[in-house]
Amino acid sequence: MNEIVFFINKVLVAGLVTGSIYAMGAVGVTLVFAILRFAHFAHGDLMTLGAFIAFALTAAFPHAGAIFGLPTAFVMLPAAMALTALLAIWIDGRFYRPLRERGAKPVVLVMASVGVTLMIQGLLRLFAGTGTRSMFIAERKDIFRIELPFELARRKIVITEPQILVILFAVVAAISLHWFLTRTRTGKAMRAMSDNPDLARLSGIDTQQVVRTTWIIAGSLAAAAGTLLSLDVALKPDMSFNILLPIFAAAIVGGVGQPYGAIAGGFLVGFAEVLSVFNWAILLRPFRPLLDGVVELPTHLAFVPTEYKLTVPFVILVAVLVWRPTGIFRGKVI
Amino acid sequence: MSFLEVCDIHAGYGGADILKGVSLSLREGEIGVIAGPNGAGKSTTLKAVFGLLHVSKGAILLDGNDITNRRPQELVRAGMSFVPQEKNVFPSLTVLENLEMGAFVRRDDYGHMIERIFDFFPPLREKAHQPAGELSGGQRQMVAMGRALMTEPRLLLLDEPTAGLSPKYMSEIFEHVVAVNRSGVTVLMVEQNARQALAIAHRGFILASGRNRHTGTGAELLADPEVARSFLGG
């Protein structure tokens, strides 16, 4: 029983948290690709940027969270999302739109986004340094230990407040996104433009408005994912480099341009990661008396050492590109 | 006075002009058909009228207003609709959503228009919630025309609406074009099946190498032995 609780803590909770973060990032990447037809490499930096904005707001009003009984950074999240969305629109207008209007090829836009990545990272380090920070300034991280009503389970399910918030936020975001894409005029126009941009234009769809909406969704989800990730772990200026690969893997696994695919891909990559670094020796422990004398159980038995976690999305990415380049949901082939 | 007046336009895709002086005029409520051999500039003429490529010389007037080189979005608002030859539906959107996208520029209640289009194209009513990409070629063409009619346009431009359809669907589409026209919409269409198309046309324009070759009523052109010999396959 204790082993199962350990599995829930280390795999179920961790997988849901990681998957939620990846899903929110991957939806942004996939939507930008669906509408603007280029791989937006600066997406990880929109996440870092959003997290730093949330951090700055938390530092400015460190006691705001107490009013709601929530972490201050979470209370500041709507403001951080709005500001990041505005910045995303500004970045598009400054760096990507001029290229689009000159009919630049997608690869040129990809390179421009690499430039934006370097720029944002440089600016963040310039103003905020390179150190790791905690998003909790005037408060502590709440940790819940849930006791199970079983005799055998002495271990408790451990979940932190940020982890609960991540999962709940991702669920609400996914439902809102579905509602937006299928029920609203602008959401349908987004899907139409993803399907057939020329026809969208000659149907009279306001494509500029669709592009703006895309950045609003991508930017605000990036800010949310970045802030929630920093709440769960810590705020680091190099977050984006570590998160970019899993997010792209998630978007591609799900089928590029398919928002639901990106959500599925996010959880797939998230769970693959936690399952591959999980110490399976612990689950085998109850069988030790049976195996005694047959094989000796190692104390640590994982597919991948934790430090090499990042290879997991990379392997998934390569496997998908080799065997099913369109992804699970049949997206656009890059 | 004519409703659509194209005066001696020159246009192309950036390189040399494909249209080297095309003129046509259409009165309100008429069906105009553009026919001619491959590469004559038929589709190019239609695209130039809808602002999809740059007109370097000449003028296009809609109801007396100069609309030369106006953007498609403005032309939709001015009462024009265009049905491209290929990729003319949003495949992952349902039939109903395709029609809603046709009405994107409308801020009023267009529910009655959806009803009218379902009355016009009955097969679409039962497929309303199916993705348009799953429909047959003929039904997709109906979705495409339905989408274009959602704005209640005064001028409908159709680029080879029967391309790739079986003969059965072909005559069905021609019947629909006539019905749309009878409901008060002026139609300008490009057609490969010139004989059938000219039979329903009030005005016919036969182009060759980017210029007008023959112009007349549909019946006149069909009766002209030279047109028959050169362009209608004997």
Image: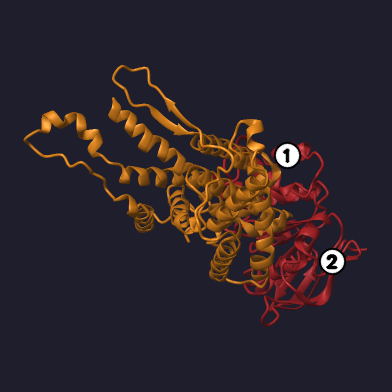
Name the residue furthest right: B1
Q: How far across and down, in percent of the image, does residue B178 sit?
A: 75, 50
Quadrant of image for the C terminus of chain B: bottom right
Which residue corresponds to mark 2?
B67
How far across and down, in percent of the image, does residue A6 sit?
32, 32
In the rendered image, which residue does mark 1 sit on?
Answer: B114
Q: Quadrant of residue A7?
A: top left
Where residue B189 sits, quadrant-wise, is bottom right
For residue B51, the mark is none
Quadrant into which the N terminus of chain B falls = bottom right
Chain shown in orange: A
Q: Specify the chain shown as red.
A: B
As measured in the structure, the alpha-carbon distance from the residue carrying label 2 to the one carrying label 1 is 29 Å
Element type at mark 2 = loop
Which amino acid type is marked by label 1?
Ile
| Residue at (84% x, 73% y) in the render | B59
Q: Amino acid at mark 2?
A: Ile
SS for dot 1: helix
